[in-house]
């Protein structure tokens, strides 16, 4: 299937999930991550979910990161340039939802993308080669190309698709993907 076909299919599937299902699957993803060899780094970027679109609730992963005393990085979106600016999450960080419902930090300590070791990546679906389908604006592809993290980990409620037919060189492939029932490493 093409990105547009997959986007339509998985937006619809995700919209049909009940709140309880989103929470259960999000917790299962966090528990699956606990058993992976990904915790030896310092700087972890995490997305904050758009709750009305039933994105993975990353609060559980945030608690893991805080418990492991990691540097947590969150982003602010620039819709004019289609870029992200990254800020260190601290006890003083305040948030405000943008026009799309994404919680974003209001100022703070800016972190260069090159400092980020691990990125938890939002997506609608991913294929067996690690090509993700997001909302189609390229924010994360640009960010991942800048950061070149040691690990780019997709978080998905749904099984892998066979192939994104129109994946191209602008698409930054994931190193792995965490599903509620398994952790998949790409390129092995």
Image: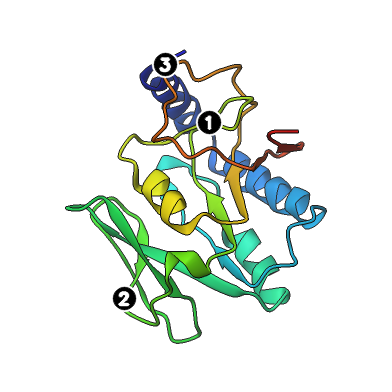
- Crowding at label 3, few (<14), some or many (≥20) Cα neighbours within 10 Å? few
Farthest residue in the left direction? 80
Name the residue nearer the viewer: 134 or 11.
Answer: 134
Secondary structure of residue under mark 3: loop
Name the residue nearer the viewer: 10 or 107.
Answer: 107
Farthest residue in the top direction? 1
Q: Which mark is residue 2?
A: 3
For the residues bearing labels 3 and 2, Cβ distance under 8 angstroms: no
Q: Which of the two labelled residues, at mark 1 and mark 3, occupies the earlier sequence position? A: 3
Mark 3 against mark 2, which lies toward the viewer? 3
| Residue drawn at point x = 39 percent, y = 35 percent | 170
The residue pinned by badge 2 equals 106
- Residue 40 falls left or right of residue 52: right
Expressed as whole percent of the image width and height from the top left, the position of residue 10 reads: 47, 25
- Above or below residue 92? Residue 6 is above
| Residue drawn at point x = 20 percent, y = 53 percent | 81
- Above or below residue 66? Residue 137 is above
Expressed as whole percent of the image width and height from the top left, the position of residue 82 reads: 26, 50
Q: CA distance from mark 1 to mark 3?
A: 11 Å
Quadrant of residue 67 in the image? bottom right
Expressed as whole percent of the image width and height from the top left, the position of residue 182 reads: 76, 37
Q: Which of the two labelled residues, at mark 3 and mark 2, occupies the earlier sequence position? A: 3
Q: Which mark is residue 131?
A: 1
């Amino acid at each position: 299937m093409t990105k547009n076909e997959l986007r339509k299919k998985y937006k619809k599937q995700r919209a049909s999930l009940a709140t309880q299902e989103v929470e259960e699957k999000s917790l299962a993803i966090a528990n699956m991550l606990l058993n992976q060899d990904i915790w030896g780094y310092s700087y972890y970027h995490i997305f904050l979910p758009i709750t009305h679109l039933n994105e993975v609730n990353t609060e559980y992963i945030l608690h893991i990161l805080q418990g492991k005393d990691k540097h947590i990085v969150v982003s602010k979106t620039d819709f004019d340039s289609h870029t992200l600016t990254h800020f260190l999450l601290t006890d003083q960080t305040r948030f405000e939802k943008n026009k799309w419902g994404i919680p974003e930090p209001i100022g703070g300590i800016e972190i260069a993308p090159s400092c980020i070791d691990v990125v938890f990546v939002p997506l609608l679906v991913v294929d067996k080669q690690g090509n993700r389908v997001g909302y189609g604006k390229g924010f994360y592809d640009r960010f991942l190309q800048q950061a070149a993290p040691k690990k780019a980990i997709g978080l998905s409620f749904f099984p892998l698709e066979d192939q994104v037919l129109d994946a191209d060189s602008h698409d930054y492939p994931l190193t792995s993907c965490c599903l509620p029932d398994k952790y998949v490493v790409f390129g092995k």
